[in-house]
Image (spheres, helix red, strand yellow):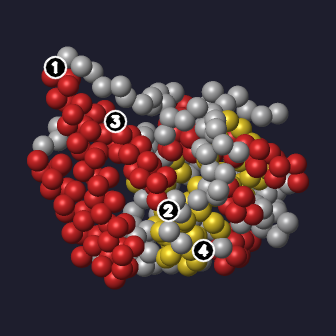
C-alpha cells in the first residue's frame, strides 16, 4: 500500500540505546537480504516533477536495484503515467506523491520510506552508468568500510559534456547506509550530512542538466526564488557586494579561473547563466527587504517544519571533501 504522501515517516537515526539497537537489528534482518548479485540489497530514491522527458531513461539505468521508490510532487505532465507503466512490469518499483517542500525534505522523507539497508539517491535527469553499477554492486558484495560514498557527476549541457566551467569536480554524496545520512533543512542546494567520511567512488554518474534551454531559464528563476527564501530565513541583508560582487565573481571564477572558456560557446552561455542565477537570488532578496520596510511581507515558499523530517541530523556531520577515490 502506498504511503500517505502528506505525512513524513519516522526517521531511523543512529542507535542511541539497547532498545534502539535491537529494533534496528530486527529491521536489518528483515529488510537487508542479499540481492540477486550476492550483495547487500539496495533501494534507490528518485524525486520527480514534470520529468516526462527524463524519467524513462533514468529508470532504465536503475532497474538493477532491489527497490525503486519514485516520489513525485504532483506532476502535471505524463510523468506519473510513465512511472506507472514501468511499475506494472517491474514489481520492485513504487510510486508515491507528496507535496514538495524542497529537495532536502523530499529526499529525507523518501529515505525513511525505503526498505533496504543501502540507499542510492538519483534525480530524474541523472543516469547510472554500467560502470558505476558494477562498482556499487562489487562494493556491496565485498562489504563497505564506510557508511556513505560520494559519486562524481559528468554534467551535460545541450547534449555536450561540460568539461570545465566549475563543474569538472562536481561530487555529491548519493550512496548511504540507512540512518547514516541526512539532508539539512534548506529549500535548495542542500548537501547531505553523514556519519563519518564519504569517500569518492571511481566511476561517475551522468547528469543531463540542461536539455531544453527555455526550461532551464525557468528553473534558474525558480531556484533563485527558493535561494532568496533561504536567505530570508537566515536573516541575510544583501547589498552591492552580494548583488553585483557575487554574481560578477561567479562568472570570473567559472569562466576564467575554472576554465569555462575551454568549453566554447556552451561554456560562455553556461557560466553567464550561473552568474545570472546568483544575481537574481540576491536581487529578489533585496527586493523583499525593501518591501518589508514598507510593510509588504514577501510570499515565501513553504518549508517542511515537521521535526521528524530532520530527525537525527544533529548526530551527523557535514561531509568533508573526499580526497581520493575508494572502492571500499
Cα distance in 3D space between marks 4 and 2:
32 Å
Q: Earlier in the sequence, mark 3 or mark 2?
A: 2
- Mark 4 and mark 3 residues within 8 Å of each other at the beta carbon: no
Comparing 75 with 131, the one in front is 75
- Mark 3 and mark 1 residues within 8 Å of each other at the beta carbon: no
- Residue at label 3? 229
Cα distance in 3D space between marks 1 and 4:
57 Å
Where disc 3 sits, the SS reads: helix
- Residue at label 2? 210
Residue 315 visible somewhere in the drawing: no
- Residue at label 4? 328
Cα distance in 3D space between marks 3 and 1:
18 Å
Q: Residues within 10 Å of mark 1 (few under 14, many from 20)?
A: few
Cα distance in 3D space between marks 2 and 1:
39 Å
Marks 3 and 2: which is nearer the front?
2
At a point 78% along the width and 65% down the height, the residue shown is: 64
Where disc 1 sits, the SS reads: loop
- Residue at label 1? 294
Amino acid at each position: 500500500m502506498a504511503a500517505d504522501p502528506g505525512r513524513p515517516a519516522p526517521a531511523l537515526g543512529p542507535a542511541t540505546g539497547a532498545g534502539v539497537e535491537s529494533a534496528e537489528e530486527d529491521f536489518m534482518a528483515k529488510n537487508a537480504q542479499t540481492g540477486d548479485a550476492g550483495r547487500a540489497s539496495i533501494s534507490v530514491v528518485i524525486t520527480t516533477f514534470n520529468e516526462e522527458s527524463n524519467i524513462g531513461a533514468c529508470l532504465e539505468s536503475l532497474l538493477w536495484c532491489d527497490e525503486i521508490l519514485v516520489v513525485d510532487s504532483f506532476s502535471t505532465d505524463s510523468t506519473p503515467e510513465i512511472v506507472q507503466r514501468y511499475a506494472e512490469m517491474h514489481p520492485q518499483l513504487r510510486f508515491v506523491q507528496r507535496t514538495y517542500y524542497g529537495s532536502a525534505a523530499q529526499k529525507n522523507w523518501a529515505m525513511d520510506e525505503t526498505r533496504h539497508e543501502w540507499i542510492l539517491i538519483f534525480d530524474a535527469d541523472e543516469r547510472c552508468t554500467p560502470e558505476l553499477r558494477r562498482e556499487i554492486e562489487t562494493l556491496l558484495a565485498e562489504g563497505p568500510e564506510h557508511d556513505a560514498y560520494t559519486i562524481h557527476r559528468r554534467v551535460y549541457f545541450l547534449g555536450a559534456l561540460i568539461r570545465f566551467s566549475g563543474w569538472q569536480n562536481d561530487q555529491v554524496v548519493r550512496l548511504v547506509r540507512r540512518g547514516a545520512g541526512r539532508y539539512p533543512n534548506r529549500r535548495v542546494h542542500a548537501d547531505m550530512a553523514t556519519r563519518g567520511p564519504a569517500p569518492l567512488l571511481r566511476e561517475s554518474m551522468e547528469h543531463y542538466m540542461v536539455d531544453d534551454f527555455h526550461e532551464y531559464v525557468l528553473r534558474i528563476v525558480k531556484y533563485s526564488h527558493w535561494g532568496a527564501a533561504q536567505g530570508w530565513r537566515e536573516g541575510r541583508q544583501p547589498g552591492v557586494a552580494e548583488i553585483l560582487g557575487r554574481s560578477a565573481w561567479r562568472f570570473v571564477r567559472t569562466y576564467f579561473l575554472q576554465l569555462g572558456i575551454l568549453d566554447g560557446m556552451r561554456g560562455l552561455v553556461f557560466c553567464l547563466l550561473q552568474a545570472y542565477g546568483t544575481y537574481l537570488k540576491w536581487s529578489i532578496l533585496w527586493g523583499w527587504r525593501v518591501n518589508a520596510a514598507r510593510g509588504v511581507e514577501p510570499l515565501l515558499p513553504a518549508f517542511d517544519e515537521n521535526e521528524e523530517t530532520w530527525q537525527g541530523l544533529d548526530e551527523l556531520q557535514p561531509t568533508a571533501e573526499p580526497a581520493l577515490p575508494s572502492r571500499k
